[in-house]
Amino acid sequence: MTKYETVYILEPSYDEVKAQEVADRVSGWLKDLGAEVVEVQKWGKRRLAYEIRKRRDGVYTMIVWNGGSGMMKELERRLRLEEDMMRALTTIHVPPELWQGMPEAEAAAAAEDSDRD
């Protein structure tokens, strides 16, 4: 199984209680699909880089989970169907120790080494 992270943005009108309900619902979907939820981080209300649906703010949540690619596709489909979901993105989780504190030259060299393999 692969470790993924899903970040989604809810309408800015959502308070903590509603945002928690959505996080519980999404975690439930993942468990129903056979995935293991590792961590749920509520980032709260933040300013968007650009307007989405004429909104400048959104409520962010990140869920880290273990599962298969078929689970990811089904989760993305369900998130798209959610009415108050402004955006959602799922990527493969990269632990912070692999990308934090590494000078750019070392990162470029590591990338070149992995390309050769």
Image (cartoon, rainbow, N blue to C red):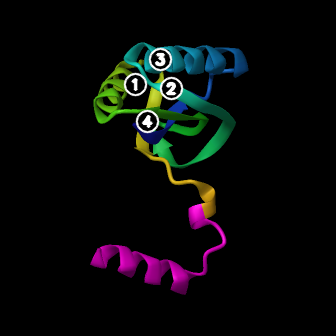
User: 20 or 106: which is nearer to us?
Assistant: 106
Tag 1: amino acid: Leu
Secondary element at tag 2: strand
Disc 2 vs disc 4: which is toward the camera? 2
Category of crowding for the residue at label 4, using alpha-carbon neighbours closer than 10 angstroms: few (below 14), some (14–19), many (at least 20): some
Are discs 1 and 4 less than 8 Å apart at CB? yes
Q: Which residue is drawn at 53% across and 20% down?
A: 27
First reached walking from the N terminus: tag 3 or tag 2: 3
Q: In whole angstroms, how far apart are the C-alphas of marks 3 and 2?
A: 6 Å
Category of crowding for the residue at label 1, using alpha-carbon neighbours closer than 10 angstroms: few (below 14), some (14–19), many (at least 20): some
- Span shown in magenta: 98-117
Disc 2: which residue: 36
Q: In whole angstroms, how far apart are the C-alphas of marks 3 and 1?
A: 15 Å
First reached walking from the N terminus: tag 1 or tag 2: 2
Disc 3: which residue: 31
User: 34 or 103: which is nearer to us?
Assistant: 34
Disc 3 vs disc 4: which is toward the camera? 3
Secondary element at tag 1: helix
Q: In whole angstroms, how far apart are the C-alphas of marks 2 and 4?
A: 19 Å
Quarter of the image containing the C terminus?
Answer: bottom left
Tag 2: amino acid: Glu
Disc 3 vs disc 1: which is toward the camera? 3
Disc 1: which residue: 79
**Most distant residue in the bottom direction:** 105
Tag 4: amino acid: Ala
Does the rendering let one see residue 53? no
The disc placed on residue 88 is 4
Q: Residue at x 56, y 17 (%)?
A: 22
Q: Residue 106: x, y in percent?
A: 53, 83
